[in-house]
Amino acid sequence: MLLINCPFCKNRNETEFVYGGPVGVNRPDPNISTDTEWVEYLTLVPNPTGPVQEYWWHARGCGKWFAITRNTVTHDILETQDGQ
Amino acid sequence: MDNKNRLKDGGRIDRSSVLKFSFNGQNYNGFKGDTLASALIANDVMVTARSFKYHRPRGVIGIGVEEPASLVELMGEAASGNNLSTTVLLKSGLKAKSINCWPSVDFDLGAITQIFSKFIPAGFYYKTFKWPNWHLFEPSIRKAAGLASAPKSPPKNGHFESRNAHCDILIIGSGPSGLLAALIAGRAGANVFLIDQNSEAGGSLLNLKLEINNKPAMSWVSEVVSEISKMPNVLHLQNSTAWAYREHNLVIVNQREINDSSIIERSWRVRTGKTIIAAGAMERALVFANNDRPGVMLASAVQGYLNRYAVKPGNNIVIFTNNDSAYTCIKDFQNAGIKIAAIVDSRFEIPVNVLRSAEGVDVFSGSIIKNVTGYKKVTSVVIESIVDKKSEIIVCDLVAHSGGWNPTVHLHSQSRGTVRFDEKIAAFVPNKDVQNASSVGACNGNFALIDLFEETKVVINKTLADINLYIEFDDHLDCEAETYSIVPLWNTNLSKEKSKAFFDIQNDVTYDDVQLALREGYSNVEHVKRYTTGGMGFDQGKTGNINIIGTIAMQEGVGLGEVGTTTFRSPFTPVSFGSISGVREGSVILPFRHTPVTQWNHDKGAFMYEAGARWRRPGYFPKAGEDFQEAVNRECRAVRTGVGVYDGSPLGKFELKGKHVGEFLDLIYTNVMSSLSPGNGRYGLMLSEDGLIFDDGVAFRVDENRWLISTSSGHSDGVNHHMEKILAFDRPEWDVKITGITNQWNNATICGPKARDLLAKLGTDIDLSQTAFPFMALREGLVANIPARVIRVSFTGELSFEINVSPRNLLNLWEKIMEIGSEFGILPVGSEASHVLRVEKGFLSLGHEVDGTVDAYDLGMGWIMSKKKTDFIGKRSVHLRRDLKKTRRELVGLLPNDPNEAIPEGAPITPEGQKRATEGFTTACVWSVVNDSWVGLALLERGHSRHGETAYVRLQDKVIRAKIVPPVFHDPKGQLLRS
Amino acid sequence: MQNYSLFSLAKNAFTGHRNWQKAWRSPPLKDEYDVIIIGAGGHGLATAYYLASEYGITNVAVLERGWLGGGNVARNTVTVRSNYLRDQSIPFYVKSVSLYEGLTKNLNFNMMHSKRTMVDVVHNYPKMRDLRRRQLTMDIYGSSYEQISTEQVRKLIPALTGGGANSRLPIIGGMVHKDAGVNRHDAVAWGYARAADSLGVEMHQQTGVKSLIRGTNGNIEGVDTVKGIVKAKKVIVSVSGHTTTLTETAGLRLPLRTMNLTAFVSEPIKPLVDVIVNCSDLGFYFSQSDKGELVIGGAPDSGQSFRRDIKQHVFEDTVGAMLELFPAFKKLKLLRQWGGHLDITPDASPIMDETSVSGLYVSAGWWGGYKAIPAGGLTMAHQVATNSPHPLMADFSFNRFKNLDYILETGTTTAR
């Protein structure tokens, strides 16, 4: 159970949050991107053995969305980025 | 004789409190403060178990959680699977028995396996029991393995509790290090949590007769315990085991023996700033022939039974050791009147100060115990000199052996800290911490009191400094400077020994087994463990694994550090599932959701279902004597000919406010919503970015910047997440605020040709005429004097009004509807009837037609995929998928050729009904009252162009033929719902 | 290879078991092989065996960074079954189950394969519908699945004392899948390794691959290991969670993300449960090992992870759900628990295919890969040996993602 540092509420238990998936590339313009680019946007995510950036939503708390950088091997949370 | 082996005085037992207990049907007495093991030894019960493979008699070997042999099963209310007799606190009326022996532990027929022992070495089952197949042998193997029986019923009295705790410093272990750390930190004002698995504080000091400040060490312990008990910032728990070290300094503690008898055990989730692991060390065994005989015990255990429990496990003892610590037993043995027949020390050079303590005793240096004689009790040992192999028989009734000490690195290792092998103490010690934790004292390889006190002071002061706390500590802590030296002895060169020498006493893993594993190439420490099962028992190899590692190292010619240990996993000691689950029980697990009408449904005898997102919904309302189909038919008939009412409250609802809501809805729905004028709505489809149908629902514009959307009841959380995420990261510049209002607005939906009449009769100030209140419009006003928002949506295909009111008014509204609706033949409609009605109309149901393989075009809903919008979520992906030009499965209706033949939902459709890959499947099939026939929906390859053809539905025992028709069986033009 | 039998066991008993040979050799690492398999897990070892036994390709090295069979195959809940939904999936798993049943004989190593009925314990009607849908499609491919009543569920699982009509989660019925089974996972790994070794395949432990090496024409050329460079024109990556870690060294990005999946065992107890119990609505399943431990598993944790550890709140929920149906287990104890990592594709179905790098093959995306070991090994060996996909695995290609042509086992919307 991670201890997540919500930008608004500070350290709270993982159970108060909803995982929002890894931060990938920004949504490309579907009218401009090629098929390959579009499929890559949908299916490829960073999968490092190390720091990964991901979204979290303090759904059972203040409702804030933000991103953290977490090490996928140690689960150390290196950084919190306020999303909004 | 009662308590034959109990010393006349001494020990920490309460002799004024006699406890009666029984073991294997025999009655005995013990004292408060005893464990089951100490009480058994006191009563000279030396055979307490039989080993699981060879059924050799075993006695108690250790004194705590490291115990490998003495497993017992408790009976009655105390039943809880396997327990170590060394950790079972003696209680009045305790009933226990040995496991895995029949008819008794003293005479066990299972021992006959010993005759076959040469045929059943480690891993023998991989080589045989293959023909004809494993099934022939499996039942007997299963019966023979497995130890205690599972408890047959849950505890009758009491419950499990859980708590969350936060502290500055968690100290694991109330031995000398832990107590000192708690004392200093407590005085400094830190928030301290001190826990220890034993029944009282003191750790190793409980078993020894050491002195601090020229007084018994246990007096110092009492003083410290007393001082910290008065500190409000220190929580001190005994009988509490830290069994798991998780991420982010979360430690899980299981507390037992709670003062409140209604609580069986309490689980603590402790999130700590810093952890001080003061978990001590556990003595390890030596490996020699017949080292499992009853009466062969760990030296520190014998010492502990003497000092702590005033129990003498024997009268004539041989000590076998490779290190200094066993010599501290000598004085205690002599004071208790135990004759020391010999000290056998495998070291060639024994430190002078250590030898001094053995004055007057025969010391055999450079020697080992070659063998132990005696079957149910030790009668003598054969001592052999290592160099010249001269041997000698020494008569004795007790062997106290010590192979050295293993720092308890389990929790450190669980925290993902690394370990290294320390040659000086020949043991694995903590190397690096990766979380905010430190190991101190014996668990860090510091065994001498004087050293561990110093170390503790340094560590705790640094810990306090890190949180800006300081305290001056100058209490006296004078104690002897003990030494510790060891020459490792991983086994006693047993290559030619015929008797068995055990590495893992519980799983009967012998020296030969480990050699066999190595011989067959299973040389990685993990392979040896798995092949021999060494270390896989209840004790997880606490006293024996190191010897296996040492033996592998010797054999492979490498250091123990290179061999490594097997992974230390939680729990440190076995923990009950009840404690882990805590208060999760019954309605607290997955609480179900209900509306103000749920109870009314119950009262009316509705058959209740649990639907998506845990909503309790009525399936159907059977009248007395009615079966499922009759009830459903009756409800459908009411809706199609008169009026029905259902509770649509579970549908997800959100209110969206802001300047950009219209654009936002245009992005997340497939059709255009922004063109809606206030008071109007539209049915919409929501796709996920990969083009799969995510949800469907209706969106209504309430006014310029205020909208209402509804989702399916099952996906409302998912839709909420989806919407929130887009606004947070893809469109943060948009002004859109989302408020979930599923619980704030409930509704009663009346549907049927008489719905308008009913609504009028209920009384409303809303103009109900078709022109003033058309289909898909929203009107606000009073209904039956209740403020309401009325929406004309229809999921049944009939004229329908969804009357939304505040929850406190729903039941009132509902009852009025039922009362006034009775003249129109109103009936409450359950989800089964709703299902039938929507199938008749070919309306989409996410749980049925949306299969992950079909898109809106396949479902005949191409009209909902806006061609005007250049972008909406899912658009690109849908077309990308369609570009494959693969054969698509398309929504069709099915009319079985025999109208009375039902097609099971999910039934596959195959070409000509043959046994081959499917070309589609039935998504739904219901009895249609209005068609007097079974009607179904299916997804079928090229369905749109196959109307009029026959579909072959393949079941296990027959093929059903059905006509492929358009997917609508009632009011195909949709005139009724627009009326 | 040395024959394992009751006779040879007895014979060796009289010589103190000193004459058993090593289960596999540890030869020196050569400079080049025809095929390199990265990962001595279930799939890697099975592929090695079938390459040698079915296709005569024996100049093969299996490179393992740790100890043989030490990955997910070492920490498995060993449920073997074929009750899948899609036409693409069912025949593959049916084949795998049947290969498992004959494995002991084929490999001359006792897998202790125990055919067991799997019982789905069902609490709600949508779930029942979903399972029944599988039943009729499975029937086409020879896999059995039948609906049973609540009474029959209790008869098959006497220990299931919870879930009564008045409980929070009443059981409404169940499904039985008689073709399921459990076996000994270490035996599967060791059996395949020993048999492959006897045919000439080399096992190389403690030989981690640092990166893949591509030639100037872009094709795979070999691997760079901690023991030096080894060449091969065909390289198979079967390393579960670490697939992308390796393939990225070849400049490839694959649609995989690595998640943590945990399991736990109870203390050993007398035989109590003879079937595999599956409660997918509550998110747990278990069977009883021959040693007497209950081996229990649940759903993966959310979030990407290589930590192979336990998420406390998820674990507590799983145990709580289990106790709801088996309240007598409250005083039973947890003995050991662990995590493993697996990688998951966008549609949660596996990938077995050659990548866009010629000669580089990948077997990944296995969520529930233990049951697929024999068929996965056989079909991958086929593809590598014949340069064409085996009909049973042809659909599980990378190609399906090009047009988002998912194979969705969930049967309904993604609801991700």
Image (spheres, coloured by chain):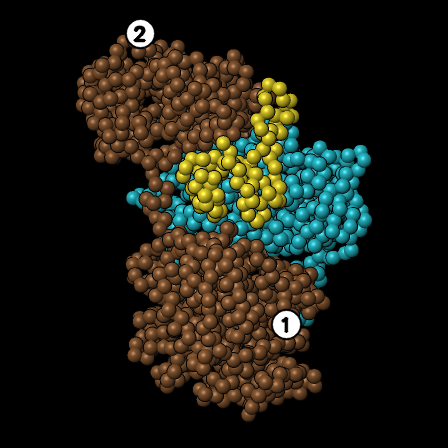
Chain colours: A yellow, B brown, C cyan
Q: Is residue B554 left or right of residue B533?
A: right
**Residue that label 1 marks:** B424
For label 1, the SS is loop
Query: Is residue B49 in view from this perspective?
Result: no
Q: Residues within 10 Å of mark 1 (few under 14, many from 20)?
A: few
Residue B833, by quadrant, is top left
Residue B482: x and y, percent?
55, 79
- Chain under disc 1: B
Residue at point 31% right, 70% down?
B93
The one nearer the camera, C219 or B28, is C219
Please provide percent x and percent y for residue B315.
47, 87
- Tag 2 subunit: B
Numbered tag placed on residue C203 in the rendering: none
- Give the residue type at disc 2: Thr
Which image quadrant is residue C141 in? top right
Q: Are marks 2 and 1 in contact (CB under 8 Å)?
A: no
Query: Disc number at residue B771?
Result: 2
For numbered disc 2, what is the local secondary structure?
Answer: loop
**Quadrant of image for the N terminus of chain C:** bottom right
Label 2: few (<14), some (14–19) or many (≥20) C-alpha neighbours in 10 Å = few
Residue B349: quarter of image: bottom right
Residue closest to the eye, B492 or C163: B492
